Image (cartoon, grey):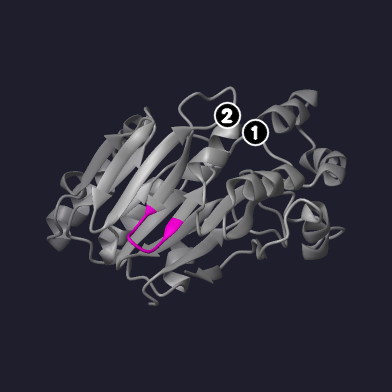
Amino acid sequence: MSKDFVALLGTKGGPAIRPGSSMPTSNLFCLNGQQIVVDCGLGVTRGLVDQGMQLKDLSLIFISHLHSDHYLELGPLLHTAWTAGLQSRVDIYGPAGIDVCWEGFLASMKADIDLRIEDEGRPDLRDLVAIHVIDSGKVMERGGVTVTAIRNEHPPLIDTFALSFRTDSTHVVFSGDTAPIEALEDFAKGADLLIHEAMLESALPGLMERVGNGSDKLMAHWLRSHTFAHDAARTATRAGVGRLALSHLIPSDDPAYGAQDWQDAVAGHWDGPLFVGHDGIRIEL
């Protein structure tokens, strides 16, 4: 693997997948020789393997918040890594409640885990995972990578975070899911890369029709809890970041819209290098 890069493994906003759609949110940050998984939406395991990662080397995971499109595959990723040879500790950093998710997964898979320990001689998966509940401020420092967090604005959730990853030579900021907030401009100030969620305003009514089982509450959630592409562009400009990547795209699976529509949405608000996220895109740092 290249020494320093970010791979956007899943770039779709929301948990549903349909024919032709991309996968929900997951990312691989390779910084200072460390492989860091950021969010574990559906498809993360396949996405990591497609980037050339050996699952047995899994050691560090961050979960930004407890919406299913960001942590649905956390348990299956860890279990699959275990069956692929994992035998060292994995640290998981996430909001309050992530421990309940993990314990629930272990309970659901107890029979299989116990069987594989007895029948195949594997180490106990339950002993390999350490959960760390995060808050705003410094979260972790390890191997030359410092991670800090701020609460973003993604109601009705409160424990939902943007994350900053710094090394001596690189600064990457992941917005998480958020409405536009000034705090993120300061948090991302001068970053080499800002990965920011984005919506296309004109495409939301059509998306509502395709969802089919949501009320006007769904539209209200999008509008109060997420960021239009043009506002993500303004945040990037005000923060003075080097490059902007749009991800968690809402929508990402409407054939009426493509990369040019996202580029048009940020035009006039951002004039730096732009990456319109698609599953598997690798951004070298």
From the image, give the main secondary structure of the stretch colored magenta: loop
In the image: residue 17, left or right of residue 84: right
Q: Residue at x 15, y 59 (%)?
A: 122
In the image: residue 187, left or right of residue 148: right
Q: Which percent across, then down, holds residue 112? A: 27, 49
Q: Residue at x 22, y 42 (%)?
A: 130
Q: Nearer the viewer, residue 104 or 260?
A: 260
Q: Quick one: SS at disc 1?
A: loop
Is residue 50 shown to the viewer in this render?
Answer: yes
Whether pointer 2 and pointer 1 mark residues with C-beta atoms closer than 8 Å, the reply is yes
Residue 92's tag is none
Which quadrant of the rendered structure holds the N terminus? bottom left
Q: Is residue 245 magenta?
A: no
Q: Nearer the viewer, residue 240 or 247?
A: 240
Q: Which percent across, then down, holds residue 80? A: 34, 59
Q: Earlier in the sequence, mark 2 or mark 1?
A: 2
The image shows residue 284, relative to residue 74, as above or below, that is below
Disc 1: which residue: 179
Q: Which percent across, then down, holds residue 201? A: 82, 42
The image shows residue 285, relative to residue 234, as above or below, that is below
Q: Give the magenta part as a residue range.
A: 166-171
In which quarter of the view is residue 37 placed?
bottom left
Residue 153's tag is 2
**Residue type, label 1:** Ala
Is residue 16 shown to the viewer in this render?
Answer: no
In the image: residue 14, left or right of residue 134: right
Q: Quick one: SS at disc 2?
A: loop
- Dot 1 surroundings within 10 Å: few (below 14), some, or many (20 or more)? many
